[in-house]
Amino acid sequence: MANVTIWHNPRCSKSRDSFKLLEEKGIDAEVVKYLDTPPTKEELKEVLKMLGIAPRELMRTKEEIYKTLHLAEETDDEKLIEAMVENPKLIERPIVIKDGKAVIGRPLEKVVELIS
């Protein structure tokens, strides 16, 4: 079985759903509790590349910290990435990674496609 990693927040129902799906499929995924162990800038850039999206698309724009840091006005992708590294709560979840590809597990069907 290919290596699978999930950036997981156990308090998030969507993240728990993705984790449960991986378990049900018999996939022993590496679990990264990214709130406890935030990704480095390089790791985040690599995941963005795998996702094929811009940094803002990975951000939880409704989080209070997003508003507090005035990130809606920020146009520098590097600064958005730095904000996510410093405040991992801003990172959308869950992220499931397999074979150099990644998906945000919303909706869950994206995870199903990735692991199939």
Image: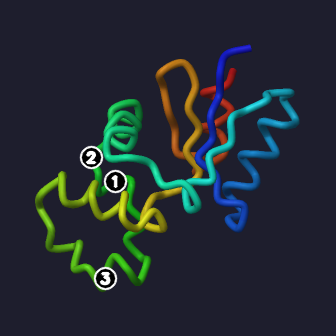
Q: Judge from the rendering whether residue 1 lies leftward or rightward of residue 8; answer left or right.
A: right
Marks 3 and 1 sit apart, C-alpha to C-alpha, by 16 Å
Residue designated by label 3 = 67
**First reached walking from the N terminus: tag 3 or tag 1:** 1
Q: Are marks 2 and 1 in contact (CB under 8 Å)?
A: yes
Between label 3 and label 1, give the one nearer the viewer. 3
Q: Where is residue 57 in the image (x, y as percent from the top left)?
A: 34, 53
Q: Residue 3 carries which label?
A: none
Q: What number of labels is visible?
A: 3
Image quadrant containing the C terminus:
top right
- Specify the quadrant of the image occupied by residue 46: top left
Residue name at image x 18 percent, y 52 percent: 78
Question: Label 2 neighbourhood size at 10 Å, few (<14), some (14-19), many (20+)?
Answer: some
Residue in the picture at 84% in, 37% down: 23
Which image quarter holds the N terminus? top right
As shown in the figure, which amino acid type bears the numbered disc 3?
A: Lys
Check disc 2 and report its element: helix, strand or loop: loop
Residue 54 numbered mark, or none: 2
SS assignment at label 3 = helix
Separation of residues labelled 2 and 3 (CA atoms): 19 Å
In space, the residues marked 2 and 1 are separated at their CA atoms by: 5 Å
Residue type at tag 2: Ala
Residue that mark 1 sits on: 57
Q: Which of 98 and 43 is in front in this view?
A: 43
Please report the residue visible at 38 percent of the width from the left and 61 percent of the height from the top.
59
Q: Earlier in the sequence, mark 2 or mark 3?
A: 2
Q: Is residue 12 left or right of residue 86?
A: right
Vertical relation: 16 (above or below) 102 = below
